[in-house]
Image (cartoon, coloured by chain):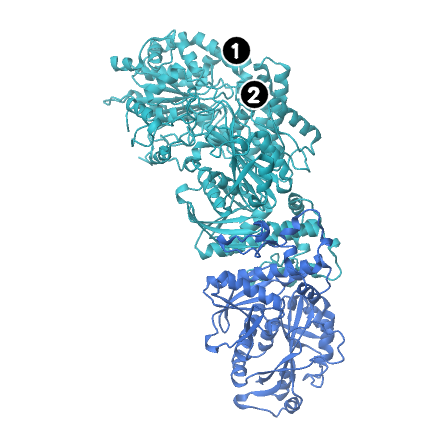
Chain colours: A cyan, B blue
Amino acid sequence: MAGPGEAEAKSQACACAGGGGGGGERDMAPSAPGTSSIHRSGSRPQLDLSKAEIQGNFEERDPTILLPNQSDDISHLALDIGGSLIKLLYFSRHEDYSNDDDKRKRTIKERLGITNGNLRSYPVLGGRLHFVKFETHKINECLDFIHSKQLHRRDPYPWSSKTLPLGTGVIKVTGGGAYKFADLFKERLGVSIEKEDEMHCLVSGANFLLKAIRHEAFTHMEGEKEFVQIDPHDLYPYLLVNVGSGVSIIKVDGEGKFERVSGTNVGGGTYWGLGRLLTKCKSFDELLELSQKGDNSAIDMLVGDIYGGMDYSKIGLSASTIASSFGKAISENKELEDYRPEDISLSLLRMISYNIGQISYLNALRFGLKRIFFGGFFIRGHAYTMDTISFAVHFWSKGEMQAMFLRHEGFLGAMGAFMSYEKHGLDDLMSHQLVERFPMGAPYTGGNIHGPPLGNLNEKISWMEKFVRRGTEITAPVPMAPSKTTGLGGFDVPSSRGSALRSDASALNVGVLHLVPTLEVFPLLADPKMYEPNTIDLSDQGEREYWLKVLSEHLPDLVDTAVASEGGTEDAKRRGDAFARAFSAHLARLMEEPAAYGKLGLANLLELREECLREFQFVDAYRSIKLRENEASLAVLPDLLEELDSMSEEARLLTLIEGVLAANIFDWGSRACVDLYHKGTIIEIYRMSRNKMQRPWRVDDFDAFKERMLGSVGKQPHRHKRALLFVDNSGADVILGMLPLAREFLRRGTEVVLVANSLPALNDVTAMELPDIVAGAAKHCDILRRAAEMGGLLVDAMVNPGDGSKKDSTSAPLMVVENGCGSPCIDLRQVSSELAAAAKDADLVVLEGMGRALHTNFNAQFKCEALKLAMVKNQRLAEKLIKGNIYDCVCRYEPPSLSQM
Amino acid sequence: MDPQDFRFSTQISHLALDIGGTLIKLVYFSANGDNFEESSDGSIVVRSGCSVVEGRLCFAKFETRKIDDCLEFIRFNILHHSSGVKHPNGTAMDKLSVKATGGGAFRFADLFKEKLGILFDKEDEMHCLVVGANFLLKTVPREAFTYLDGQKEFVQIDHNDLYPYLLVNIGSGVSMIKVDGDGEYERISGTSLGGGTFLGLGKLLTKCKSFDELLELSHHGNNRVIDMLVGDIYGGTDYSKIGLSSTAIASSFGKAISDGKELEDYQPEDVARSLLRMISNNIGQIAYLNALRFGLKRIFFGGFFIRGLEYTMDTISVAVHFWSRGEAKALFLRHEGFLGALGAFTSYETQSHNNDLKSYHHTVEREIVNCSDDKIRHMPVTANLNDGETIECSINLV
């Protein structure tokens, strides 16, 4: 690995030449020449071979994913026009509103060897992929949508910012309609269609999604979805079954290596076609919905019907096995009108799904494939369809094979068409660089049709108000992302039957895919493949219901706080109402269909709430509370430091840890603690809380930690080189708890990196706020002041950080890095590049607070030492996790995990 | 042995039933008059202690829902003829035991007992199918044939090279059986899209009253009206890259999704045709895939669904030919509908005597104008290859 200085130099060169040096760290090169104000949107130290691969792509003249952020919304699109649905996929980039002049960031960059990256780049993202559907017979709606977003006037190469003159654009399109509607596109939008091979698109789309999205695939047995993590290196070969109007069965052996090995003409078109003739349903969805209430035994001839209710067990057929689909309809005295449409729909669905499953199994068997992925519009996340297919595969293969489904099942072709643009760079994206978010409309719609886009938040709120009021027949507006929130984009409008929430509980939502090339896997994870951030698995119904209820109950307080944070204006109230409504809808949706948004952990749920707040432009709901508490805590800090300095080393260490645990009580995320706040001043609560810290704590590894810090008889400890302190709340928590601990490390010559949120979440302190807090603390403390100066945290400091470290080898810098997220929890698979860089030399990770040390990462294993500190401020969690009670404490010290050493 | 017992056993071997979900298939032995007389004398004793009765195997079928017709047929046509033979106890109708297979052997056991005094001796369905097929393939010349492009071609089966083969029995549903030898077989697959599906969906869609009516309709239809062809999707061009011609069906009934057209707007003929192609094609494909699994080159299709109907056989053959790239062959049986019934019939005797029957007496098939007599007014109107055919044979009696 190159040293920091070297890397910086190299990056400058690479920005132009690209490709050159092996092993050096390079930044993404800027494109769109001529705009000097353009920032690079991220930095990416080269940490492993996979990264080298990514870099390799930049040997092209134009860099790929990471492009300078433009002042306008840059978009591009690809389409898959099928017989019944148009799937549209478009990419957008958004304005970068951060500034790069922050002294902290410059210092961090220099110190950590991050080259000219834009550290405020998250959540200003590389871009977003939006997934949208239209019905093919309403192609004009689709054309209007494209036109209103001006998607067609972009350079065919989506990463270029040029707006094309009318009549010169080219759009990649796949599906049969690519041929059929070419003239229409030319006429209406003045763009040419470039037809992409359907099969090729399907496969490359599936390959991309399976590799890039962590839990893209899931199994579906007896109504239970289970997300499956696919190892990108162990994906091939597999069988891809695309169930569209007809069915294509494709053996995929690798990137671009595939063969259509089979197919069947009994597919989605057969279901819908026969279904229409037999039931008079007006839409595919209507037909599917009918099937939910059907009983196929009214029409199908079952084994039991033939054997007089008995099984034909000799050959393994139970009485309820269908012997002959529609076999009962031969009865003489019954006409079509005498059968329930519901039953007909279900019989049809079972017949076709089962047949598809069987033929797929037989083909998988031919080639010895264990995994069969099913996609295409027929499936639509419909539970019964998936169950039937899975059953068939399971039954015939005797459990040897797995039928799996894809969350983006309908978009494989469109995704592939998008991939077929040159230099899109998507191939190189890895799962940790993608974040999927669900905008406010998701729970209302579930993903059907589109209308013209809405320009701003106001129109969006109006749309939602209208939707909620009428609950039906809203076909028009589609909210569009306001430039400064992260959560929005493609948005689906309710289907015509429109109840407030989709009644088809099984349908899955597809969110907006944020491409964040600056995100990295935290390098200190012992085994990233095995890492699971969530401690609580919300697929457990009891847990899910509990936490959804907790969030629901907390909602009114949160809305009040958020509205107050913006002065309680009418506008803020309106947005607050809209937020409450939208978030409640999310919760209701998840209650109804836990897998609607993919694999759901508590961390995802808490982040969803923060994103939802941001979506309604509540940038920082706890801003004033945080300021007030910071001020109050800073005021009592000198007394505390004085008290600490008067203690012996051993007593001090204990008091420090007690202090961290005690101060962690100041948490606005905990209902119990909010109630406490009204009972006294900060320092009173803090001291009271600390005095109650009677050891042994519920989880108490303090002695081991102490031995590591202070050594034992005859054994001198070696000091830590660098400690990463993941901080939690503003106010007392960070100022009276974590800062004194940081000071202790600094005093021992250990470099300290405070790791804080990139974006606000509840009253959590952010990386943006920390420098001011540290500066405030440094006024009363030389240790902190010197370290902060070295770390570049004091804006007016004149010290050159490089010089400082040379002059005094025992003094260590105090730095601040952002973690890359805006949630009270942290998923260490997706952290900022600056945190990843800071982690390189770290030999201790300290995780503090419920969100980061308990809800997530409680079981995380690290390559270095780890200290997990938290007060449990939830009775249920205390019981579940540590078999204890509310306000119990966790002090978990773990030596480096050996699993990956 | 008591000659009276011989007579009795001769008597019951006159009839075997295969009662399926849709059709009842009946095989009965009609002894030649003189032979019958001789046997009633109890005088014919052939070597090895076997007695031989010359006669014909006759076939008949009824729709299961018209089971009363079947009961009447049996009462008048068979029991009547054999009424001369009394049960040793003198109660002719008492406790007469008849071999029966198919699901209906369970379902209608009480009915037969009550109405005809017949007790079913239930035989395993799959076993009967296989035994019946083996019997036909080994003993009846020109039993198997291929059908491709309108050409019917009889295939001489070498007895020593019969196994293994795939037997696909298309009844209401479809069973696929791998046959490795006499009595060696395994049901390896099946599908619920079978004859029952054709008739069931067909009835709902066309108001046809019978299977034959539906088949007749399908003769005059054009599936392109309702099926979505590859050409419909690709604007008339082939998707040759993957070997699909523009006339290949991309999606059965796929065109019916278009707005504005209701069931009434389609010709029943076209609907019937699309349905037939969908089901035949699907059966052909699944059969091929199963044959492929076990490396079987010959697939015999049987069951009432086929009925010697050219278009059905053609579609199945094309499917097998297409998917196997000519490697596997679809073969059909002239007595396709009666495999189970024949199997049940032959199961009257012990295995060793079945073998005797096959080896000593070559069966001769002969066209017979009508196997029913005037007394039967409700003979099913099904007209196909098998109707009116009998197999001349002799039966060994212990």
User: Looking at the rendering, which quadrant does residue A5 occupy?
Assistant: top left
Say which element carries label 1.
Answer: loop
Q: What residue type is labelled 2?
A: Gln
Quadrant holding the N terminus of chain B: bottom right
User: Left of A689 or right of it: where is A652?
Assistant: left
Q: Can residue B338 be seen in this view?
A: yes
Please, which chain is the residue tagged with disc 2 on?
A
Q: Is residue A892 visible?
A: no
Please, which chain is the residue tagged with disc 1 on?
A
Residue A573 is situated, as x and y percent measured from the top left of the image, at 63, 18
User: Looking at the rendering, which quadrant does residue B223 occupy?
Assistant: bottom right
User: Left of A95 or right of it: where is B111?
Assistant: right
Q: Which residue is drawn at 45% across and 15% down?
A: A769
Q: Which of the two discs, 2 and 1, labels the residue nearer the N terminus? A: 2
Separation of marks 2 and 1 at Cα, in angstroms? 33 Å
User: Left of A260 or right of it: where is B348?
Assistant: right
For label 2, the crowd category at 10 Å Cα-Cα, with few meaning under 14, some 14 to 19 and many 20 or more, is some
Residue B36 is situated, as x and y percent measured from the top left of the image, at 65, 88
Quadrant holding the C terminus of chain B: bottom right
Residue A116 is situated, as x and y percent measured from the top left of the image, at 37, 22
Callout in the foreground (2, 1): 2
Give whichever of A459, A192 is nearer the camera.
A192
User: Looking at the rendering, which quadrant does residue A28 occupy?
Assistant: top left
Q: Which amino acid does label 1 sit on?
A: Gly
Residue at the disc numbered 2 = A617
Say which element carries label 2.
Answer: loop
Residue B101 is situated, as x and y percent measured from the top left of the image, at 62, 70
Residue at the disc numbered 1 = A680
Q: Which residue is drawn at 74% across and 54% down?
A: B264
- What numbered label is drawn on residue B146? none
